[in-house]
Amino acid sequence: MNDAEVTVTNPVNDQTPKRVAPLTVVLALVFVFFCCVLIYVYAQTKRINPVMLDEHGHPIKQSTQSATGSQH
């Protein structure tokens, strides 16, 4: 058996192992890594409260009205 291959037992017959291609394992790890990066970026943007900038790099003034139109 090649060291790069991962074997998993077949649920139908426990005697014959089913081979998983190394590319499948690599793609699964890339998918998990990508999801972790998305969660990290989302959490960081919620924590730091980013400021929107206009085309000249100046902060855009935030309105004091909520979505319903009531003022605070």
Image (cartoon, grey):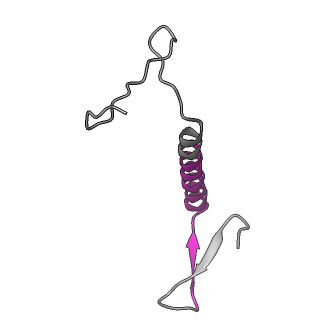
Quadrant for residue 66, please give it. Answer: top left
Of residues 58 and 23, the one drawn nearer to the viewer in this rendering: 58
Quadrant for residue 22, please give it. Answer: bottom right
Magenta span has 23? yes
Which image quarter holds the C terminus? top left
Of residues 61 and 21, the one drawn nearer to the viewer in this rendering: 61
Of residues 37 and 60, the one drawn nearer to the viewer in this rendering: 60
| Residue 54 image position (x, y, % from top left) | 44, 14
Magenta stretch prevailing secondary structure: helix
Residue in the picture at 26% in, 38% down: 68
User: How many labels, in total?
Assistant: 0
Residues in magenta?
A: 15-41
31 shown above or below 13: above
Magenta span has 30? yes
29 shown above or below 68: below
| Residue 44 image position (x, y, % from top left) | 59, 41
Quadrant for residue 8, please give it. Answer: bottom right
Residue in the picture at 60% in, 57% down: 29
